[in-house]
Image (cartoon, rainbow, N blue to C red):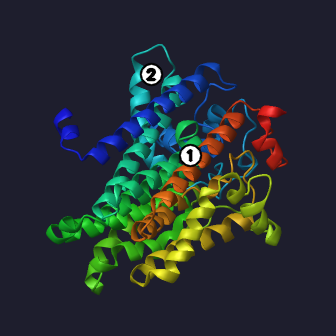
């Protein structure tokens, strides 16, 4: 392992050190949350719904979630689904299966640890609460290494690749969903997109093992969708990543096979639960926030993504500029923006993200917007004064993000939707 580290480029070594620092931060935040936080659980909120698939199938051998919800959600209120039932008479689970698949390694580690320690092997005790989120956090960090490597392979200069990659973590709310709540679906979606971006740079793999490479691309794309259904908006962006490898109809067959495999797993799980074919499980929950929701998702004081985490706005501007001035990569910029618009519409019309740090539902956009932004910045001849200004802006974005995150962790301002920008940014003087 040490030899492999020594064989890396100086930029890769530097980025590995950065990821090592993030890993230490993750361990500190997780430790503080487990032993000194308001709740001993790291699997919280929507993650309980995702994790119920893993716990119920592996421990109970069924998809009857009544006891799983009781174990996992307490002491928080039980989900409203407890009052409903499927045609099979079971408590429904509206969450897709993708996260349940990704939880398996951490679940196994937690279960083995519980079996040889005094902890209960019930799927909810401390070993599970640690290993399931921590395994996801390690996966996320691995995905970032793949993303950075993909940028370097694509000819992006180190002076661009490093800040773009680091700002995805330190300059946005992704930091919270890697260090504090990695069991949520958002960081996992980022990881799969990072893996797809890396795979798109593996040209020798596609030339030597074309069927396997295309099947893997399709499998990762299918996994992305069954992690979170709204990730369907990234399909055009993914097509642009691999369009050079999909010249003929037969080239699509392995990709479609890989993607349909995860879709089939999803439908089989829903059929097991419901007894009927289910395409959209969020019954009774509509996209009814209208224009108010669209506005608030970007510019609202409670969690407007452009106001709480301005790096998103800068990334969107970079992509808009790229569409205009870089004709060669216009499809890349356009589909990244199309993904943004699609997710904006879905998130804005939904507009129900409770105690989210910032607007968490935009997090998956970070790889899709960051790759084209890096292409743009790499193509522009920047003067020394502009570079210095960029460093100052990047440092300010990181400072502000860490500042408001600290206030969020310490509960110095309300986590409810009624908070204001003043509450978020000025918590130290209130």
Q: Secondary structure at mark 2?
A: helix
In the rendered image, residue 197, in percent from the top left (x then y), is placed at 37, 63
Q: Nearer the viewer, residue 380 or 242?
A: 380
The residue located at (75%, 56%) in the rendering is 352
Q: Where 163 falls versus 27 (above or below)?
A: below
Q: Is residue 65 visible?
A: no
Give the total of numbered labels: 2
Q: Earlier in the sequence, mark 2 or mark 1?
A: 2
Instruction: Classify the position of the C terminus by image quarter.
Output: top right
Q: Is residue 400 left or right of residue 375?
A: right
The residue located at (39%, 82%) in the rendering is 328
Label 2: few (<14), some or many (≥20) within 10 Å? some
Q: Nearer the viewer, residue 392 or 129?
A: 392
Front tag of 2 and 1: 1
Q: Is residue 425 visible?
A: yes
In the rendered image, residue 202, in percent from the top left (x then y), is placed at 25, 64
The quadrant in which residue 314 appears is bottom right
Q: Nearer the viewer, residue 161 or 197?
A: 161
Q: Where 383 falls versus 126 (above or below)?
A: below
The residue located at (61%, 49%) in the rendering is 397
The quadrant in which residue 151 appears is bottom left
In the rendered image, residue 221, in percent from the top left (x then y), is placed at 41, 65
In the rendered image, residue 42, in percent from the top left (x then y), is placed at 58, 32
Q: Is residue 208 left or right of residue 368?
A: left
Which residue in the protein does label 1 denote? 395
Which residue in the protein does label 2 denote? 114
Q: Nearer the viewer, residue 112 or 330?
A: 330
Inter-mark Cα distance, 2 to 1: 43 Å
Label 1: few (<14), some or many (≥20) within 10 Å? some
Q: Residue furthest top?
A: 118
Q: Secondary structure at mark 1?
A: helix
Instruction: Classify the position of the N terminus by image quarter.
Output: top left
């Amino acid at each position: 392992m040490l030899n492999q580290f020594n064989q890396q480029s100086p930029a890769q070594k530097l980025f590995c050190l950065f990821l090592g620092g993030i890993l230490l931060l993750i361990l500190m935040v997780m430790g503080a949350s487990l032993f000194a936080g308001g709740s001993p659980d790291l699997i919280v909120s929507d993650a309980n719904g995702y994790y119920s698939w893993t716990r119920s199938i592996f421990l109970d051998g069924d998809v009857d979630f009544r006891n799983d919800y009781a174990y996992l959600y307490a002491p928080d209120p039980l989900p409203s689904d407890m009052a409903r039932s499927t045609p099979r008479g079971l408590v429904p689970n509206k969450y897709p299966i993708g996260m349940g698949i990704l939880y398996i390694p951490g679940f196994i580690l937690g279960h083995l640890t519980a079996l040889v320690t005094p902890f209960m092997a019930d799927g909810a005790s401390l070993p599970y609460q640690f290993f399931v989120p921590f395994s996801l956090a390690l996966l996320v960090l691995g995905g970032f290494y793949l993303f950075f490597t993909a940028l370097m392979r694509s000819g992006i200069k180190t002076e661009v690749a490093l800040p773009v990659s680091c700002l995805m973590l330190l300059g946005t709310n992704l930091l919270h969903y890697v260090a504090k709540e990695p069991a949520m679906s958002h960081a996992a979606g980022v990881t799969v997109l990072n893996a797809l971006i890396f795979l798109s740079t593996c040209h020798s793999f596609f030339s030597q093992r074309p069927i396997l490479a295309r099947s893997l691309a399709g499998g990762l794309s299918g996994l992305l969708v069954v992690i979170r259904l709204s990730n369907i908006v990234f399909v055009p962006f993914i097509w642009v990543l691999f369009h050079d490898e999909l010249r003929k109809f037969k080239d699509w067959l392995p990709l479609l096979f890989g993607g349909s495999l995860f879709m089939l797993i999803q439908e089989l799980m829903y059929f097991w639960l419901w007894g009927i074919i289910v395409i959209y499980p969020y019954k009774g929950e509509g996209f009814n926030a209208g224009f108010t929701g669209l506005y608030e998702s970007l510019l609202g004081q409670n969690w407007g993504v452009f106001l709480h985490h301005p790096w998103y706005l800068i990334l969107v501007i970079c992509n808009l500029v790229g569409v205009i001035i870089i004709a060669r990569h216009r499809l890349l910029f356009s589909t990244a923006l199309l993904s943004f618009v699609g997710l904006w519409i879905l998130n804005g019309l939904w507009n129900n993200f409770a105690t989210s740090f910032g607007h968490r539902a935009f997090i998956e956009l970070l790889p899709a917007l960051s790759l084209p932004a890096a292409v743009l910045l790499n193509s522009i001849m920047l003067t020394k004064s502009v570079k210095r200004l960029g460093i100052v802006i990047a440092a300010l974005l990181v400072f502000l993000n860490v500042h408001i995150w600290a206030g969020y962790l310490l509960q110095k301002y309300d986590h409810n939707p009624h908070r204001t920008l003043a509450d978020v940014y000025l918590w130290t003087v209130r």
